[in-house]
Image (spheres, coloured by chain):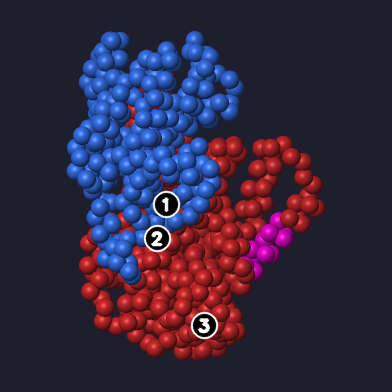
Amino acid sequence: MITFMNNSDSEEEPCNERTSLMSAESPPVPSYQDGLQASEAGEPQAHRKRRTGSSRSPNNIADGDMSDSRVPVRESALENEEEELTLKYGAKHVIMLFVPVTLCMIVVVATIKSVRFYTEKNGQLIYTPFSEDTPSVGQRLLNSVLNTIIMISVIVVMTVFLVLLYKYRCYKFIHGWLILSSLMLLFLFTYIYLGEVLKTYNVAMDYPTLFLIIWNFGAVGMICIHWKGPLQLQQAYLIMISALMALVFIKYLPEWSAWVILGAISIYDLMAVLCPKGPLRMLVETAQERNEPIFPALIYSSAMIWTVGMAKPDTAARGPSQQMRDAAEDGRENHGSPSHAESQMSETRSPIPTRPITSFEELEEEERGVKLGLGDFIFYSVLVGKAAATASGDWNTTLACFVAILIGLCLTLLLLAVFKKALPALPISITFGLIFYFSTDNIVRPFMDTLASHQLYI
Amino acid sequence: PALGLFLFTIARDPLRIIILIAGAFFWLVSLLLSSLIWFIAVKASDPRDEPLQKGLLIFGVMFSVLLQEAFRFLYYKLLRKAIEGLVALSEDGCSPISIQQMAYVAGVGFGLMSGAFSMINLLADALGPGTVGIHGDSQLYFLTSAFMTMVLIFLHTFWGILFFHGCEHRRWWEIVAVVVMHLAVSGSTFCNPLYVGSLVPSYLLMAAAAVWAYLLSGGSAQNLRRFLLCKS
């Protein structure tokens, strides 16, 4: 594709964010947050606007030590400027990630609480063939471990396959795959979801209206995700898609398997991103070498890159860097790929966004945003949704898991700022979430219940 | 009211939101540890012995209060470090957020979390059929719970300010006063369902803490008057 050539002129594109790599994604597609951009490569090009994003450190809390690494960098004005900007906007980026994650979780929890469909057990996916209805505890544990192994191996295989495709430049294939999967996600799952919601609230709806609504929703979604669209709309779509996928997971994964899978996925994420031979790391590096954005369709980006003829910042413009933004791919950032969630069902991998392939455009980057892979969204929501669905302590547990995940996200972003590389976003948050879930459910709940029954306050 | 506080003062600034969530997290961890202790104690004791259970509960509550204050202190330490980092990183050498603001936000964080944990199951049950308190609890259960939660949230906020101020200026008696107040408030809830015994002292304490925190933050009667009369 021609655009690729053009694109190689601008190195920057990925710039800005430091995305951490998140592999989590639903089995099929690894979602990750990349921080690619240039920051790692450290290219000091003239027109690097700033991005270097490396320092996107969102968190300044507990930053004491971190500051040392930053402070001494006063050498180049560019870097200096960057750092300060990064730090200054650091907290803002954390919030930019907090909000969508929170929204996604709220949607999932609200649906779980109200719509019965998603908590009924109506069968399992073929990826988890072992049932958990066995009489003995040991057998159940064994089954769930086996389920997990199967699921993880499916994910690994898909990821490796995707990386190979990417390496050998089979872009059309990947592209088609992603489109197919997001198509299916947008239409089929939305249809099921709407059907269930309408059933719950006993609202009558005729088929033509339903068809119209779903068609519109799906078509706009496809355009937004894979092509251009307003940032907010794109983000909204990505959130909705992640929520849908998470709901599917919650429904179809058996109890213990779900928890073991969550744990195993975070370990896998850690390894896939940090090990030198890990597939995701290779993916990131390859993309960096080629100066392309990585799978826009799989990533949620908090900042937008507008393709605008003039360099005009979309949002608050940063002073210096405005002009220089080369076109990176605008789509890139904005894509989140739901498809990877999809892959589960449809075996499609999110297609590489065509965005970057379009013509050479001037991109204006308003703020370096941070990118988060969609899989991370999905698994966070799965954790919180499961907590809401199955915990007997209800809201307390859900709230505890929610706070734990947010704190994990903060810490991950902090590490991102320190290390300036793509990092896995899953492990810390999921670990915290799991710890808090189990402890709150088993230990805190009786305590709070007794307190509440006597109306004591602590 | 707590939500109003949040919306008006915290939601604007992302740094404050982070501090808030971290504060809530710290409270949560303290709750976890204290309930762990209680849980172990309960399991190790005889479940049928009523007075013992009650006694254990009281012990659990007190211990939890102490743990909460300990965690507040830890959080203070963490925030101190963070402020240093922020100052070093900022452009003009002064931190974008002051320690007092942090104290306020941390207090709100603690308060929100504790309030949420106290109220939310109640609210959820309230949405369903009216079966709360059917076992002969007072009719005013909901109302008093709501008021108590509100007063507790406010108290946490004020305690946050007082506590941090005490730590900053090394006035240990302030810290001790906060701890004692917290213990007193929790203890007063033991009088429930005799609501007079718990709500009234709590509100009085809250008023006292409010005035104290206000004075510490640099306000004065004059400021207040000017503010209320909208003078410039």
Q: Could you give the CA–CA distance between mark 1 and mark 3, rounded to whole angstroms?
A: 33 Å
Picture quadrant where residue B221 is located: top left
Image position of A221 (left or right of B152)? right
Image position of A249 (left or right of B23)? right
Image position of A59 (left or right of A168)? left
| Contact between labelled residues 1 and 2, with CB atoms less than 8 Å apart | yes
Q: Which chain is red?
A: A
User: Label 3 sits on what residue type?
Assistant: Ala
Element type where label 3 sits in the image: loop
Q: Which chain is blue?
A: B
B43 relative to A65, above or below = above
Same chain? Circles 1 and 3 = no
Q: Chain of mark 1?
A: B
Report the magenta stretch's main SS: helix
Residue A384 in picture, x, y percent from top left = 45, 44
Residue A45 lies in the magenta stretch: no
Kindly identify the residue that appears in the image at 35 percent across and 19 percent down.
B188
Answer yes or no: is residue A201 visible.
yes
Q: Chain of mark 2?
A: A
